[in-house]
Image (cartoon, coloured by chain):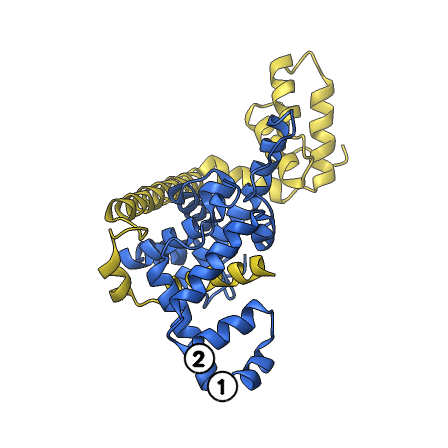
Chain colours: A blue, B yellow
């Protein structure tokens, strides 16, 4: 591995050793919200340990300049996706009668495509819209997002400047996280 | 369409977790659905043991390399092998391997396994081992 463009074994040890409690907490939190347990049958600790081992062995290249949190989150997401595919295959094979396949186990970027239950989706959409019922800008933003309208059109339809768009988006992100820190529980969609 | 909206919202939540300051996240540790101090300690403890193990491996490797470099027999053999061509060493190795009376069967099997990849390094190592065992004359000419 090229030490000019990638961190060396010793540099990686130092970077991982310097992780703060808050950084570790955030990384574990993201793994859980990515559905490590529901999609891949792995705990947040399983994913964390795998990512640390891979990083230390320099198996997964770590480009210089990429922050430790970003590296660990991207690596963890990739690991969860790969394991989710195997997990889904195992579930398929073990279900000889071919009844229900776990709705949450599929490709990472498409995992919400299989949420299945319309009532689940509707209930969650309403919860989120309700959370911003008193915020005119956020409501406009969310309604347009729901209708899959692109940013450029949202700017016009909601009469936002770029700065307002970013502020509204940030407000939505933070308020939704504070209200639903565990994320959308897609694993409950089929139940 | 609504499923895509929920996916975006889920990514927003993840984005907000990542973007939150260390101070803010720390104040939430242990609260519902945030990471627990116990989980963080467990992850940190894994980091310490994994790094300790790595450093131990590296130290052992370095000690071995140092010991090898201090072994005069190795440096003499390295020096001798560097003067030979791979083809010459290979012919000598093959010649010894074919002489079943001189080389015990177990040793032959071990060398065959060692040389499975057939790389130059494998040939050089087998040649050096056979010189050490006295089965190859290191001074013998490549073409003799």
User: What residue is at 60 percent from the left and 81 percent from the top?
Assistant: A153
Residue hosting label 2: A137
Q: Residue at x 73, y 24 (%)?
A: B95
Name the disc covering residue A48, or none: none
Q: Which residue is mark 1?
A: A160
Residue B141 visible at all: no
* Quadrant assignment for the N terminus of chain A: bottom right
Would you call the spot at circle 1 few (<14 residues within 10 Å), some (14-19), or many (20 or more)? some
Q: Nearer the viewer, residue A15 or B123?
A: A15
Residue shown at the point (42%, 60%) measured from the top left: A127
Q: Nearer the viewer, residue A135 or A177?
A: A135
Whichever of callouts 2 and 1 sits on the residue coming sooner in the sequence is: 2
Q: Is residue A53 left or right of residue B79?
A: left
Q: Position of residue A189 (x, y in %)?
A: 51, 46
Q: Nearer the viewer, mark 2 or mark 1?
A: 2
Q: CA distance from mark 2 to mark 1?
A: 8 Å
Decide: few, some or many residues near mark 2? Use Cα within 10 Å; few <14, some 14-19, many ≥20.
some
Residues marked 2 and 1 touching at CB (< 8 Å): yes
Q: Is residue B120 in view from this perspective? A: yes
Secondary element under disc 1, as helix, strand or loop, is: loop
In this view, the residue in front, B37 or B100, is B37
In percent of width and height, residue A80 lies at 51, 46
User: Which of the 4 quarters of the picture holds residue B52?
Assistant: top left
Mark 2 vs mark 1: same chain? yes
In this view, A44 is above or below A173: above
Residue at left offset 70%, top offset 14%:
B100
Circle 2 marks a residue in which chain? Answer: A
In front: B1, or B42? B1
């Amino acid at each position: 591995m090229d030490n000019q463009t990638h961190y060396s074994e010793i540099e990686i040890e130092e970077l991982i050793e310097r992780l703060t409690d808050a950084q570790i907490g955030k990384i574990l939190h993201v793994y859980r919200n990515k559905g490590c347990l529901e999609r891949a049958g792995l705990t947040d600790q399983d994913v964390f340990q795998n990512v640390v081992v891979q990083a230390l062995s320099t198996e997964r290249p770590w480009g210089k300049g990429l922050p430790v949190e970003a590296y660990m989150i991207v690596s963890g997401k990739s690991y969860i996706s790969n394991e989710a595919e195997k997990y889904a295959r195992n579930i398929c094979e073990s279900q000889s009668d071919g009844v229900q396949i776990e709705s949450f186990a599929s490709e990472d970027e498409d995992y919400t495509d299989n949420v299945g239950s319309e009532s689940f989706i509707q209930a969650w959409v309403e919860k989120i819209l309700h959370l911003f019922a008193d915020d005119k800008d956020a409501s406009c933003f969310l309604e347009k997002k729901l209708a899959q309208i692109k940013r450029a059109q949202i700017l016009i339809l909601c009469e936002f400047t770029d700065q307002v768009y970013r502020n509204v988006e940030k407000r939505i992100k933070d308020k939704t996280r504070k209200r639903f820190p565990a994320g959308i529980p897609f694993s409950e969609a089929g139940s | 369409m609504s499923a895509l909206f929920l996916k975006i919202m889920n990514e927003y939540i993840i984005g907000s977790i990542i973007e939150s300051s260390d101070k803010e996240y720390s104040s939430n540790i242990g609260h519902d659905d945030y990471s627990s101090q116990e989980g963080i300690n467990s992850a940190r403890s894994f980091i310490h043991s994994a790094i300790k193990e790595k450093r131990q491996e590296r130290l052992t490797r370095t000690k071995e390399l140092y010991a090898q470099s201090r072994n005069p027999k190795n440096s003499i053999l390295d020096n001798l092998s560097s003067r030979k061509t791979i083809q010459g060493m290979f012919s000598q190795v093959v010649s010894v391997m074919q002489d079943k009376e001189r080389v015990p069967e177990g040793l032959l099997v071990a060398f065959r396994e060692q040389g499975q990849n057939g790389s130059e390094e494998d040939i050089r190592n087998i040649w050096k081992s056979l010189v050490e065992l006295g089965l190859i004359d290191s001074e013998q000419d490549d073409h003799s």
